[in-house]
Amino acid sequence: MTFKKILFLAVAAACIYGLLFYHVIFVGNTISFLAKSSPSLNYTFFSTHGKSARTIVSIKELRQAGIADLLVQLGKMTEDEKEILLDEFSGVSSR
């Protein structure tokens, strides 16, 4: 193997490894990164297009990563809506 191939494989492996630790969230034209609560490939790439705040917050992995705070920050839901949804889904093992 040439040095270029080894370097390419090392960079690709590092990128894949990095994806284990972050959610890449697409909200409209905005791309945001949320740290995952535990390494996995679940919901690594997630688009909010066409989904309600309730549907998004109902996903346990995203809720634990702080998706509700991100939606408030981006103006997609209010702080009151966030509290209501988090109360509704606290203790629920959905998805």
Image (tube, rainbow, N blue to C red):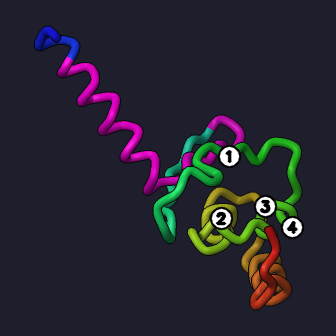
Which residue lies at the image location 83% right of the left edge and 63% below the top edge? 53
Indicate left or right for 19 with 4 as reference: right
Disc 2 and disc 1 in contact, CB within 8 angstroms: yes
Answer whether labels 3 and 2 touch (C-beta < 8 Å): yes
Q: SS class of the residue under badge 3?
A: helix
Q: Earlier in the sequence, mark 3 or mark 1?
A: 1
Earlier along the polypeptide chain: callout 3 or callout 2? Answer: 3
Can you tell which mark lies on residue 76?
Answer: none
Amino acid on which disc 3 is placed: Ile
* Quarter occupied by residue 29: top right
Query: Which mark, residue 62?
Result: 2
Q: Dots 3 and 1: beta carbons under 8 Å? A: no
In the rendered image, residue 45, in percent from the top left (x then y), is placed at 62, 43
Q: Is residue 13 found inside the magenta-colored segment of the image?
A: yes
**Left or right of 45: which side holds 57?**
right
- The reply to whether dot 2 and dot 4 touch (C-beta < 8 Å) is no
Instruction: Mark 2 or mark 4: name the one nearer the start of the chain.
Output: 4
In this rendering, position of residue 1 left or right of residue 69: left
Q: Give the position of the C terminus as an image quadrant.
A: bottom right
User: Which amino acid type is marked by label 4?
Assistant: Arg
Picture layout, residue 12 above or below residue 80: above
- Give the CA separation, mark 3 to mark 4: 6 Å
Q: Amino acid at mark 2?
A: Leu
Q: For this rendering, which residue is in front, 37 or 40?
A: 40
User: Disc 4 designates what residue?
Assistant: 54
Foreground label between 2 and 4? 2
Q: Are marks 3 and 4 in contact (CB under 8 Å)?
A: yes
